[in-house]
Amino acid sequence: MASKADGGVSGEEIWLDGEFIPWDEANVHILTHTLHYGLGVFEGIRCYRTHDDRSAVFRLSEHMRRLYDSAKINFMDIPFEQAVLEEAATESLRRNGLAEGYVRPIAFIGDGAMGLHPGNNAIRVAVISWPWGKYLGEEGMERGISAKISTFSRHFVNSKMTNGKTCGDYVNSILAKREALLDGFDEAIMLDSTGLVSEATGENVFVVRDGVISTPERYSVLDGITRATLIELAKTEGYEVVERAVTRDDLYIADEIFLTGTAAEVTPIRSLDHRAIGAGRRGPVAEKLQAKYFDLVSGKLPGYEGWLSYL
Ligand code: PPE
């Protein structure tokens, strides 16, 4: 069994199919269809301690909406109303005693029939929460991380339904991530099937050059909620933000590159394929937007109350 030292997570209770049950009893049958074939959908959501010592889940309804979108794309009918899963998310944090943490809703196909057509197997749903620190390390947030362009291409858009967050799609990400770590880098950036920059293994990519911020358009990338948040924050700060085709060498000559994601938050890249990016450390735009992002999620920025669901 994974221990804490291995990155293992633990807690008190897990919401499974409509009720909270003890953490260690949240098990599934070995014939669970999703385990064999990968068709399941999930989300990753963060809850933050706010500046006034409360706790708020960031953009809970947008994440849950994407879970239902992912399910629809994959012909899965989630047998609960969205409001029920939202309540399960906040209640899960409370029951696990988490003022800050990560919430993982997952809908999967249960056991019963085998074979690619899952027949009438039940669609099962779990909501789990656990403490999760800095995804790419505390130091990475301040000094920037190293990355490589993966030898693995992102799925062709008509293979991976990119608006869905589908379990099986993550095999592609895991291959890229493992390769990057074995090669001594912290993260991989993947190119799409035409050779344009797509996204990192679990993050969207932003590039800064001459004060203009660019990010690959919504095409082969997940329509990241942090991506959308950063675009809005950057525009509010007066930056020009362009969604466009980004090439590999656009990355090499960038003044700054940073990654965004619920888990990774806003993580700068200091080097790519052994080339220093900008000054080879976190750049001023990333630093500013990172600070704004943390102000936002901790409830310090006025006007964004609608994005915070207080526990
Ligand atoms: N692209 C991919 C492929 C991706 O998995 C994520 C989230 C994003 C972009 C950013 O999306 P958003 O979180 O809405 O800004 N990756 C999740 C999984 C991380 C994991 O290791 O598990 C996350 O950040 O929660």
Image (cartoon, helix red, strand yellow):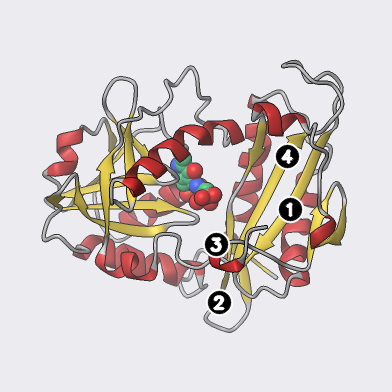
In space, the residues marked 4 and 3 are separated at their CA atoms by 25 Å
Dot in front, 4 or 3: 3
What residue sits right under mark 1 in the picture? 127
In space, the residues marked 2 and 1 are separated at their CA atoms by 22 Å
Between residue 237 and residue 214, name the one nearer to us: 214
Q: Residue at x 38, y 54 (%)?
A: 230
Q: Does the residue labelled 2 lie within 8 Å of ligand 1?
A: no
Between residue 238 and residue 121, name the one nearer to us: 121
Residue 295 placement (x, y as % from top left): 43, 72
Label 2: element kind: loop
Q: Which residue is drawn at 33% across and 53% down?
A: 186
**Image position of 70 (left or right of 94):** left
Decide: few, some or many residues near mark 3? Use Cα within 10 Å; few <14, some 14-19, many ≥20.
Answer: few
Dot in front, 3 or 2: 3
Decide: few, some or many residues near mark 2? Use Cα within 10 Å; few <14, some 14-19, many ≥20.
Answer: many
Q: Does the residue labelled 1 lie within 8 Å of ligand 1?
A: no
Q: Earlier in the sequence, mark 4 or mark 1?
A: 4
Residue 202, above or below 140: above
Label 4: element kind: strand
Label 1: element kind: strand
What residue sits right under mark 4 in the picture? 107
In space, the residues marked 2 and 4 are separated at their CA atoms by 29 Å
Q: What residue type is labelled 2?
A: Thr
Residue 7 placement (x, y as % from top left): 55, 62
Q: Which amino acid does label 1 sit on?
A: Val
Residue 168 placement (x, y as % from top left): 58, 31
What residue sits right under mark 3 in the picture? 6
* Quarter of the figure with the C terminus: bottom right
Q: Can residue 308 be seen in this view?
A: no
Q: Residue at x 71, y 23 (%)?
A: 75
Q: Residue at x 29, y 47 (%)?
A: 206
